[in-house]
Image: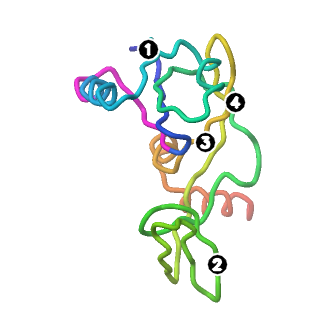
Amino acid sequence: MNSVQISTMLSFKIYFNLDTDVVKTLRKRLAQQGYKTPEDIGSVSTISNSVQRNVMCFVTIKRVEAGDSWWYYGCNFCHEEVHLLEGRYMCVNPKCLKSSPYAEKSYRIMVLAHDKTEAVNVVLSDRVVKRLVGKIATMLLEEIEDLAEL
């Protein structure tokens, strides 16, 4: 396969799919669970009109949306966003709601992805961006700070 393929499950989970036996098995399992394949969906324009559907489709990343919000403080337990409250980081996930004295910096990057019919904004999660960049967000932020000091 000559290109990287990205498929999204819900709006906050993105998985890289390679042409391997493991991915083929995953695709079969997802199809059994009701996820639609690109052949079933057709195009981004078909899914963008959906209220909520689990789909797999193949897109090309056209551009990374610029901005300062490419990282956030994430919960050490569920990885959702946290807010600083009275010196502790409190998870905003109603199923978690844990607090911690520290939080990990995590990636959250918005990209414009498209296929031959339409474009759609996709949020790349921390796990996906770490694989692309090859380092955690904290390390990249430290490198940026070091460059700014030069």
Q: Name the residue under label 2.
A: 84
Q: Which of marks 1 and 3 is in front?
A: 3
CA gap between label 2 and label 3 equals: 23 Å
Label disc, if present, on residue 67 of the rendered structure: none
CA gap between label 1 and label 3 equals: 23 Å
Above or below, comparing residue 26 to residue 104 in the picture: above
Question: Hey, which residue is sitting farthest bottom in the picture?
Answer: 86
Residue 19 colored in magenta in the image = yes
Label disc, if present, on residue 63 of the rendered structure: 4
Q: Position of residue 45 (x, y in %)?
A: 65, 18
Q: How crowded is mark 2: few (under 14 residues within 10 Å), some or many (20 or more)?
A: some
Q: Where is residue 74 in the image (x, y as percent from the top left)?
A: 54, 64
Query: At x 24% / y 26%, what residue is drawn?
Result: 25
- Secondary element type, mark 2: strand
Q: Name the residue under label 3.
A: 123
Query: At x 39% / y 28%, what residue is drawn?
Result: 17
- Return the residue nearer the eye: 23 or 28: 28
Query: At x 55% / y 58%, what residue is drawn?
Result: 106
- Return the residue nearer the eye: 67 or 8: 8
Tell me which numbered mark, 2 or 3, is placed earlier along the sequence: 2
Q: Where is residue 130 in the image (x, y as percent from the top left)?
A: 48, 48
Q: What stretch is highlighted in magenta?
A: 13-22
Residues under numbered marks 3 and 4 in contact, where contact means CB atoms less than 8 Å apart: no
CA gap between label 2 and label 4 equals: 32 Å
Q: Mark 1 points at which residue?
A: 2
Amino acid type of the residue that numbered disc 2 sits on in the rendered structure: Leu
